[in-house]
């Protein structure tokens, strides 16, 4: 049996990653598509609290802790069993989101937020992370054009916050250059999909039977 592989997808809001991930999942056998925060019932309940537009009083540390709590439950209940079964797990966001959004965007500190998440994930990191890069203005324009998309509390942040988040992702790319691969998400959907699919297939070819 081939070993499971954990692939995560990151990017600023409006980068189009959720659509691309769904397209990739349709092309792969033995793939599990999931998301953060969410993916399982407990984590989806936490997601509703975090992203509720009425929860504007939420403290940044509370936000970071809630993400870590949802991540822990999702990891243990869904991700790890799938990897143990040899599946390809495609996850829409993981720990890098917390590092970029809460660690850098909220100013809590990347190391501080990473330490919180180490307790949650117990050193379990993705085998590959694909980061969809896009100018914040373009990403937000896409969100506004997509009337069917969920608009959450983080979408309502000012432009400076979204630039800080993008800056946070660039810091992470420097820190984890072997794991994180950047893709320009400003092109057409088909172009971004083809580039992403190529990277995913190359990584899958490197898997070894267990």
Image (cartoon, rainbow, N blue to C red):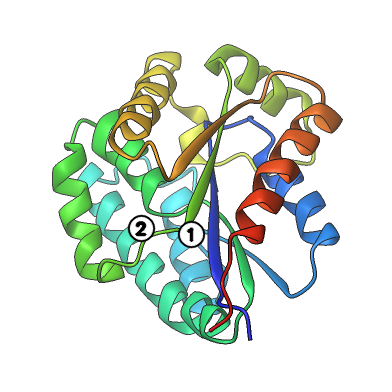
Foreground residue among 207 and 107: 207
Label 2: how many Cα within 10 Å (few below 14, some 14–19, many 20+): many
Q: What element does badge 2 sit on?
A: helix
> Pointer 2: what residue?
67
Question: Mark 1, residues whose alpha carbon is within 10 Å: few (<14), some, or many (≥20)?
Answer: many
Identity of the residue drawn at 68% across and 46% down: 18
User: Is residue 23 shown above or below 173?
Assistant: below
Q: Describe the element under mark 1 as helix, strand or loop.
A: loop
Cα separation between marks 1 and 2: 7 Å
x, y percent for residue 6: 52, 64
Residue 99: image x %, image y %?
30, 42
Residue at 17% in and 37% down: 108
- Residue 78 percent across, percent down from the top left: 53, 79
Q: Which mark is residue 56?
A: none
Q: Which residue is mark 1?
A: 37
Direction from residue 12 to residue 192 in the image, left or right: right
**Sequence order check: which comes first, mark 1 or mark 2?**
1
- Viewer-proximal residue among 91 and 175: 175
Q: Is residue 62 above or below residue 186?
A: below
């Amino acid at each position: 049996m081939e070993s499971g592989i954990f692939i995560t997808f990151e990017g600023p809001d409006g980068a189009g990653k959720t659509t691309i991930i769904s397209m990739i999942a349709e092309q792969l056998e033995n793939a599990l598509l999931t998301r953060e925060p969410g993916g399982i019932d407990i984590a989806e309940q936490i997601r509703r609290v975090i992203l509720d537009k009425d929860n504007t009083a939420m403290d940044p540390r509370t936000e970071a802790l809630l993400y870590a709590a949802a991540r822990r439950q999702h990891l243990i209940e869904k991700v790890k069993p799938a990897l143990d079964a040899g599946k390809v797990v495609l996850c829409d966001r993981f720990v890098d989101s917390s590092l970029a959004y809460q660690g850098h965007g909220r100013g809590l500190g990347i190391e501080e937020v990473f330490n919180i998440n180490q307790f949650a994930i117990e050193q379990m990191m993705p085998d590959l992370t694909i980061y969809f890069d896009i100018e914040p203005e373009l990403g937000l324009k896409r969100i506004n054009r997509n009337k069917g998309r969920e608009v959450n509390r983080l979408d309502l942040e000012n432009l400076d916050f979204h630039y800080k988040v993008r800056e946070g992702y660039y810091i992470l790319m420097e820190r984890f250059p072997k794991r994180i691969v950047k893709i320009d998400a400003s092109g057409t959907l088909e172009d971004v999909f083809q580039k992403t699919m190529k990277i995913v297939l190359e990584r899958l070819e490197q898997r070894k039977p267990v």
